[in-house]
Image: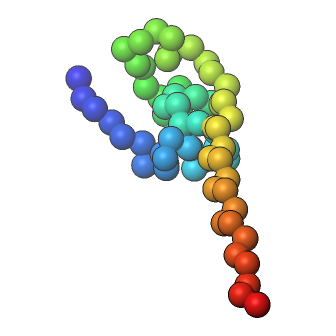
Amino acid sequence: MSSWSCPHDLNSVCQLVQGAACDPGMRGCVLHGKVRFASEAKNSPRKPVRAESAKAPAPPPKRRLPI
C-alpha cells in the first residue's frame, strides 16, 4: 500500500477541474478510471463538486481626516 498526494491540489481546490473541490478519482481527475481505491465509494463514478469559495475579507474601516 502506498500514499499519494495530488500535484493539482491547491488548498483543496483542483487546478485541472476549474472551481471543483479536490477529490482524487472524480471525473476530470488524472486518476479517473486508472486506479482502484480501497474504499468502494471512491471507485464509483463521481461528478465534481464545486469548492466552497473563501469569504472575502472585511473592508478596512474608513479613516476620518483631521480638520
User: Hey, which residue is sitting farthest right in the picture?
Assistant: 67
Q: Residue at x 42, y 49 (%)?
A: 7
Tell me if residue 2 comes above or below residue 60 in the rendering: above
Q: Nearer the viewer, residue 67 or 28?
A: 67
Q: Residue at x 42, y 19 (%)?
A: 36
Q: Residue at x 40, y 19 (%)?
A: 37
**Residue 22 drawn at (x, y percent):** 53, 37
Specify the quadrant of the image occupied by residue 38. Answer: top left
Q: Residue at x 49, y 47 (%)?
A: 11
User: Hey, which residue is sitting farthest bottom in the picture?
Assistant: 67
How many marks overall?
Answer: 0
Q: Quadrant of the N terminus?
A: top left
Q: Nearer the viewer, residue 12 or 47?
A: 12
Left or right: 7, with 64 as reference point: left
Tell me if residue 22 comes above or below residue 56 in the rendering: above
Left or right: 64, with 3 as reference point: right
Q: Quadrant of the C terminus?
A: bottom right
**Colouring rule applied to residues:** rainbow
**Residue 4 drawn at (x, y percent):** 33, 36
Left or right: 45, with 30 as reference point: right
